[in-house]
Image (tube, coloured by chain):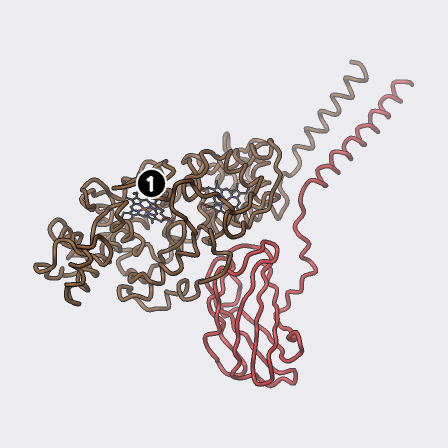
Chain colours: A red, B brown
């Protein structure tokens, strides 16, 4: 009888020990940064509401480590294409405090409010931010896109 | 058996069972798979060098790479520093050619995948890179007029079969270069435009042949790669392909808490970019500011992608065209080196600052401030056990 109690006690002790080990493992493993809530939409109204900006990678997918170009489409909130905009691009990886590895530029106006942005490169996986400063007849405004690789 | 020893036995079993549990999360597995050599894409064509994949050009390039005749004093070849049996480097903190240089010799496996060359990326193609040591007074200490004469005398026929007829060099001075000594510079400025163009063309073709050879230098498969493939396919690792608990911990740190994989990424363990990691300068060497000073040098290089000696069209020049030209993050930023084979080729960093991997990992753990500019590293405060584990993992990339 007494020996049965010993086994129960031992079992309980073991369970506690396992829970302890598991929680230590859990607490010391670093979890992937919480990026779930990050807004990664490819179409946004600019900060002061002047334009609606949207982008798509010219070759479909965003590939790591390769020079690539995007098409950036600018419309007014009413939906008219924005022509003759001056666009400058900057950005970086907020979690690693470094900027972009390249300096992308708007190289071409393709009509219908579409601009080609060349020279983009994402050298590592993680969260990237791209800032576009846009200035056109309607005024100047900015937009930030998050890109998660 | 007393109840106590039974309890101990049960505990031991529970701990063992815990070890048998999956060692890597799905996210870790994905990252580890992306580091394996089998994900290295095939070498892209280099349209700026139309001889890049011509076998006869690579063969001539290989001859030139090992030829000490390609130097001012007849003693130095590329292979003096890039030794074929030492991963194409020389185990020295700073390379020694005709003189002692200020940087460490870089290993060459897989180098043709890179967009930028040298620790600071001051050249933008493999063929333009090869021309630089040839005229550096501390390395080959040659000059381009002498190289053109040498090629004609020694390899004229082989050259012409690949590149077409050699120019008439009979009136070209024996020694002349826009770099080099005052006498060489004076001789160069006295040459006609046709002559300088002719010599530059032969010189560029020397670089193109050597680059064609260097394209064949590929990184070998390692124990890590076999482990990564087994992990991805769920196969049981054979014999010594299996990782020890220490190596597993090192790999987990590398892709996790220690953040190494943010820069040492992909199958070559490099993002092909430049970072300030706070590596201290070497006392007694001239000031070295890394990438920030290289930007102007690559722009000024007549053999860069925008120059007259590029084959193909300028669409290949994206890296140069969209290069970051300014910014504090370029100060003391150096190219992220590949870590393949690193464990068996100390010392480390751009001027051989660290003698061992222990010192390298201790540096990452402390993350000291940079003497100039801002280090991108943050202190990791690794325990002794974690530092040893990272070193153990790095060794799996070298056997």
Residue carrying label 1: B95
Residue at the extreme right: A1
Q: Dot 1 falls on which chain? A: B
Residue A108, percent across and down? 46, 77
Image position, residue B26 (x, y; %):
62, 47
Question: Which one is nearer the viewer's eye here, B127 or B10?
Answer: B127
Q: Is residue A146 left or right of residue B222?
A: right
Out of A146 and B245, give the one closest to the viewer: A146
Please tell me which residue is depicted at 69% across the width and 31% down the height of the picture: B17
Q: Secondary structure at mark 1?
A: loop
Seen at 78% across and 30% down, the residue is: A17
Mark 1 Cα shell of 10 Å, populated few (<14), some (14-19), many (≥20): many
Q: Residue at x 14, y 50 (%)?
A: B150
Which one is nearer the viewer's eye here, B129 or B310? Answer: B129
Query: Which residue, as the protein is rendered here, is positioned at the far top?
Result: B1
Spot occupied by residue A109 in the image (x, y as percentages of width and height): 48, 80
Residue B148 position, x and y percent, is 16, 55
Residue B264 in view in this figure: no
């Amino acid at each position: 009888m007494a020996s049965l109690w010993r086994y129960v006690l031992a079992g309980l002790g073991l369970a506690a020990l396992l829970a302890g080990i598991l929680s230590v493992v859990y607490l010391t493993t670093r979890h992937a940064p919480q990026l779930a809530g990050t807004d990664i939409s490819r179409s946004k109204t600019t900060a002061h509401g002047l334009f609606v900006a949207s982008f798509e990678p010219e070759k479909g997918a965003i590939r790591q480590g390769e020079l690539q170009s995007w098409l950036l489409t600018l419309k007014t909130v009413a939906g008219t294409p924005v022509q003759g905009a001056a666009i400058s691009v900057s950005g970086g990886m907020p979690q690693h405090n470094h900027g972009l590895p390249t300096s992308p530029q708007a190289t071409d106006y393709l009509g219908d409010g579409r601009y080609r942005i060349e020279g983009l490169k994402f050298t590592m996986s993680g969260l990237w931010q791209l800032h576009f400063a846009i200035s056109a007849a309607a005024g100047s405004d900015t937009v930030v896109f998050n890109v998660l690789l | 058996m007393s109840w106590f020893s039974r309890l101990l036995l049960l505990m031991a079993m529970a701990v063992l069972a815990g070890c048998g549990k999956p060692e890597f999360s799905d996210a870790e597995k994905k990252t580890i798979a992306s580091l394996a050599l089998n994900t290295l894409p095939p070498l892209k064509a280099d349209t700026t060098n139309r001889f890049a994949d011509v076998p006869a050009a690579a063969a001539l390039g290989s001859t030139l790479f090992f030829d000490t005749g390609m130097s001012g004093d007849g003693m130095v070849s590329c292979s003096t520093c890039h030794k074929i049996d030492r991963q194409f480097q020389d185990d020295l903190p700073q390379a020694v050619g005709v003189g002692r240089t200020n940087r460490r010799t870089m290993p060459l496996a897989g180098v043709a995948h890179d967009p930028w060359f040298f620790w600071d990326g001051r050249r933008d193609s493999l063929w333009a890179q090869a021309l630089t040591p040839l005229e550096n007074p501390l390395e080959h200490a040659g000059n381009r007029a002498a190289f053109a004469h040498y090629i004609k005398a020694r390899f004229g026929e082989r050259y012409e079969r690949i590149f077409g007829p050699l120019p008439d060099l009979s009136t070209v001075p024996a020694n002349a270069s826009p770099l080099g000594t005052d006498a060489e510079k004076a001789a160069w400025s006295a040459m006609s435009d046709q002559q300088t163009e002719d010599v530059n063309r032969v010189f560029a073709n020397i670089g193109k042949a050597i680059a064609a050879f260097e394209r064949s230098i590929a990184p070998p498969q390692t124990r890590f790669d076999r482990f990564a493939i087994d992990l991805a396919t769920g196969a049981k690792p054979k014999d010594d392909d299996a990782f020890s608990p220490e190596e597993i911990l090192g790999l987990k740190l590398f892709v996790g808490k220690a953040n190494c994989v943010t820069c040492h990424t992909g199958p070559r363990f490099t993002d092909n970019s430049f970072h300030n990691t706070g590596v201290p300068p070497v006392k007694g060497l001239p000031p070295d500011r890394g990438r920030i000073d290289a930007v102007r040098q690559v722009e000024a290089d007549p053999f860069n992608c925008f120059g007259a000696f590029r084959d193909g069209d300028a669409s290949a020049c994206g890296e140069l065209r969209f290069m970051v030209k300014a910014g504090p993050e370029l100060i003391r930023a150096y190219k992220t080196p590949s870590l393949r084979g690193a464990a068996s080729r100390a010392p480390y960093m751009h001027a051989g600052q660290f003698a061992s991997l222990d010192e390298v990992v201790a540096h990452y753990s402390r993350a000291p401030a940079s003497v100039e500019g801002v280090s991108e590293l943050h202190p990791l405060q690794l325990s002794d056990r974690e530092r040893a584990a990272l070193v153990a993992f790095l060794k799996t990339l070298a056997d």
